[in-house]
Image (cartoon, rainbow, N blue to C red):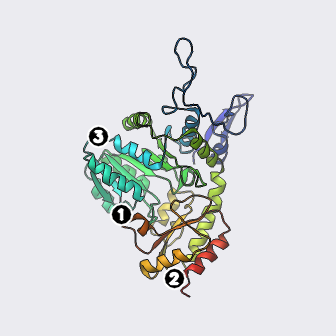
Amino acid sequence: MNSETGPTGPESEVRPWRSRTRLIHGDGHAAEPHGAVAAGIPLSTTFLRDERGELRSPFVYARTNNPARADLERRLAEISAGTEAAAFASGLAAANAVLQSLDAASRVLLGRDLYFGVKQLFRVAGTRAGHRIEEVDWSDSAAAKTALAKPAALVWAESPSNPELKIVDLAQLATLARGAGAIFVVDNTLATPLGQAPLALGADLVLEACTKAIGGHSDVTVGGLIVRDQSLPLWARVRELQNLAGAVPSPFDCWLVIRGLSTLAVRQREAVESALDLATQLARNPAVERVLYPGLPSHPGHAIAARQMTHFGSLLSILVRGGESAAARVIARVRLWSRATSFGGVHSLIEHRYLVEGVGSRTPPNLLRLSVGLEDPRDLREDLEAALRSD
């Protein structure tokens, strides 16, 4: 990850700070004028003007901007090596801002394996708006080249993808998207800014669903968009929609995400280590047909992932031998794993994605998605192995 320069010290000494430090300290200045170490939560919805009607600060109204959101956006941009960020009430609200910022009747190319909510948003709202929505397997180089031989407005990808953990060569796809005149957006939620830096690989925009690992405690819903170059014309439209539509997080939600950022590095270290251990063990289990995790050398995208990622993430999926009914039986038998949607939190979650996604799902019926949390990895493994046993 990029290392940015810290603030100037008492002797005008420049200190380079690394990512883990910046996650905790932000820009290095106390969040409060009275020197509080922890960031405050300014809850005001409106801000004072002086007797001439001029604002006393950069803030006017909480929907338009507020100190907590400005702090969060500054931190998201910094840790993602972007020039600016925009926070929204959810990851889907952020995705919708991109969708609504497109010119009419645009050609939009989505990854075939993609978070189902984003795919449905583009299928329903995008098609209704007159856009031409196409799906491409971005992990297939030949398919990507064919699809981008013609002009496009938007290329949307996830790597690793959700829920099949496919890997996309982001640098290659960025080059192809640029050649087609398309804006390239990467949903980086599974990897997090610490696991992958899509902007450095050529992406124009990065989406981070802060609800997941960045928030980290399953108690806040926030989405963030980060731009590589804020002069991108689409970015001005995104910012305009952020204000006009008002799908923004509250100051308290922003504060929760800032708190989550401060522990992201240590949480990810533990969860990723546990995920790799679990994936390795499950790959040997006769009840498991296949483990989908880019950290395994057997994964078809492992070499690309090892090149463009600094860690392989805390999410994995397994294909249970015996089909949909066998997967449903495993879900019913776990005791420690929580049967719930989402990922990236401190609690380990298990989900039968095919049933959750419903009509239109292309997810294999025997796929179980596992979000590895911070419990003892031995307990997680033993609970899952017991549920997988046929006795």
- The residue that disc 3 covers is 103
Q: Closer to the camera: disc 3 or disc 1?
A: 3
Residue 18 relative to residue 113: left or right: right
Amino acid type at image mark 1: Asp
Task: Using the rendered image of the protein, determine whether residue 131 is visible from the camera's viewpoint.
Answer: no
The percent coordinates of residue 197 (x first, y second) are 51, 50
The residue depicted at 35 percent of the width and 55 percent of the height is 110
Amino acid type at image mark 2: Ala
The residue depicted at 44 percent of the width and 64 percent of the height is 166
The percent coordinates of residue 386 (x first, y second) are 60, 80
In this rendered view, identify the residue nearer to me: 150 or 188. Answer: 188
Instruction: Of the two numbered discs 3 and 1 on the same chain, state the one appearing first in sequence.
Output: 3
Q: How crowded is mark 3: few (under 14 residues within 10 Å), some or many (20 or more)?
A: few
Q: In this view, does 122 lie above or below 248?
A: below
Residue 120 relative to residue 299: left or right: left
In whole angstroms, how far apart are the C-alphas of marks 3 and 1? 28 Å
The residue depicted at 30 percent of the width and 47 percent of the height is 180
Instruction: Of the two numbered discs 2 and 1 on the same chain, state the one appearing first in sequence.
Output: 1
Query: Disc 2 on helix, strand or loop?
Result: loop
Q: Residues within 10 Å of mark 2 (few under 14, many from 20)?
A: some
Q: In this view, does 245 lie above or below 303?
A: above
- The outermost residue toward the right is 10
The percent coordinates of residue 243 (x first, y second) are 44, 34
Residue 261 relative to residue 223: left or right: right
In whole angstroms, how far apart are the C-alphas of marks 2 and 1? 29 Å
- The residue that disc 1 covers is 140
In this rendered view, identify the residue nearer to me: 277 or 73. Answer: 73
The residue depicted at 56 percent of the width and 72 percent of the height is 279
- The residue that disc 2 covers is 287
Instruction: Of the two numbered discs 3 and 2 on the same chain, state the one appearing first in sequence.
Output: 3
The percent coordinates of residue 291 (x first, y second) are 50, 73
Amino acid type at image mark 3: Asp
